[in-house]
Image (cartoon, rainbow, N blue to C red):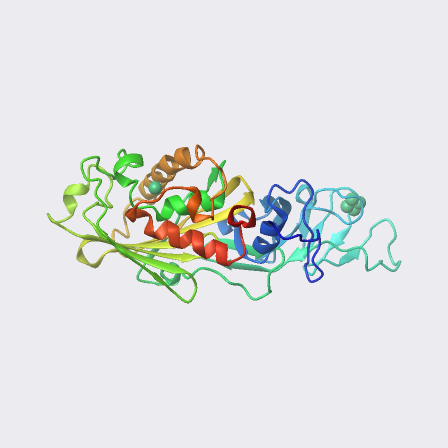
Amino acid sequence: MPTLVPDTVASERIALPRDCSFQPDDWHVLSRSWFPVARGEDVAGKPVTARLLDLDLVVYRTNGVARVARDLCSHRGAALSLGWVEDDMIVCPYHGFHYGPDGACRSVPAHPGMAISPKLRITAFPVVERFGLIWTTLNGDEKPVLPEFEAWEDSDYQSIMAPTIDINGSAGRQMEGFLDVAHFAWAHIESFGDRNNPIVPTYKVTRTPRGIRADYVSSVSNYPKGMQHLAPPDFEWLRVFEVFPPFSARLIVHFPDGGRLWILNAASPVAARKTRLFCPLARNFDKDGSVEAVHQFNLQIFNEDKRIVESQKPEDLPLDIQMEAHIAADRTSIAYRKLLKEMGLGQLYVS
Ligand code: FES
Ligand SMILES: [Fe+2]
């Protein structure tokens, strides 16, 4: 049976949102993790909205520094995202209250010079900008816990921010699809898979200090269709997957001649069945190649996956291993489900 968790846990910054679509236990666990909520390049002059774990957020910059707060003015509940930024403050569009980066109200224009109640403050969340993304946590520690993706900052690599993809499906199902190696010959035949090459050789999954790692060697090319002649005949493709729970995974694809492509699959749980996928990439080859072509190829692959993820039932990833049948090729996904279960997620499925 699910444990009973109160709506608010004493140490939490923020309580369970209204109309929460997650099981309360899951929401409390997930609210302690860090997730990306926007691409850095999409947040410039005007505040933008984001949604994380059913909570509406406003994302903006003050003097170039990314900020994330609840999209809710503490005076009459107007959306701060309709407002604007002045110096290091966000200004509410309804009565012009100004809030500093720590969330405290600094100006009530209707009553200049009067003391400002300490109750007048918005909820500001910890923020870090890394790998081209703005990350935050609702109830987690100030110290960021992010996936590892050093190639983004490596001068030998070209970093490319792929377009964001919105999926009507759960982050767990999307993540598992990213880790799945048996679907290339079926779901991805338009982009890179080969219907005549469906066999999944045995591969190894190991535990890492942060999560799991899978080293997968096969003859499935990672070049787009039409460019697959570029690999030497009989080239063995190594794909190294690493999972950073709950919803980030890194894939390093080993190309011919020492080429490396790093892909970060950072799934942000907008709601229990809505996911915003962020995908920074880095490569040490073709560095003057078309970025637009990379965007298109990436979009094509993730849209092929999206179609499948949006069709899966149940929508939530079943963490009780008995609930679905597995084949040997599913080694990574079984390990992934166990990892999420260890985090305390999916009590309903586990019981
Ligand atoms: S609602 Fe924001 S200032 Fe009144
Ligand atoms: Fe896929």
Percent across and percent down for residue 144 are 54, 63
Residue nearest the viewer, comparing 189 with 312 = 312
Residue nearest the viewer, comparing 329 with 175 = 329
Dividing the picture into quarters, in which one does residue 188 lie?
Answer: top left
Residue nearest the viewer, comparing 265 with 158 = 265
Does residue 312 appear to the left or right of 113 in the view shown? left
Q: Is residue 39 above or below residue 208?
A: above
Percent across and percent down for residue 317 are 47, 44
Residue nearest the viewer, comparing 222 with 213 = 213
Q: Which residue is drawn at the image coordinates 23% and 44% (left, top)? A: 223
Percent across and percent down for residue 328 are 29, 48
Q: Which residue is drawn at the image coordinates 48% and 60% (left, top)? A: 146
Does residue 329 appear to the left or right of 43 in the view shown? left
Q: Which residue is drawn at the image coordinates 21% and 43% (left, top)? A: 199
Q: Is residue 108 above or below residue 227?
A: below
Q: Is residue 154 visible?
A: yes
Percent across and percent down for residue 198 are 22, 40
Q: Is residue 146 above or below residue 202?
A: below
Looking at the image, which residue sits at the far left? Answer: 233
Does residue 204 appear to the left or right of 137 in the view shown? left
Does residue 119 appear to the left or right of 132 in the view shown? right
Q: Is residue 87 visible?
A: no
Name the quarter showing ligand 2: top left
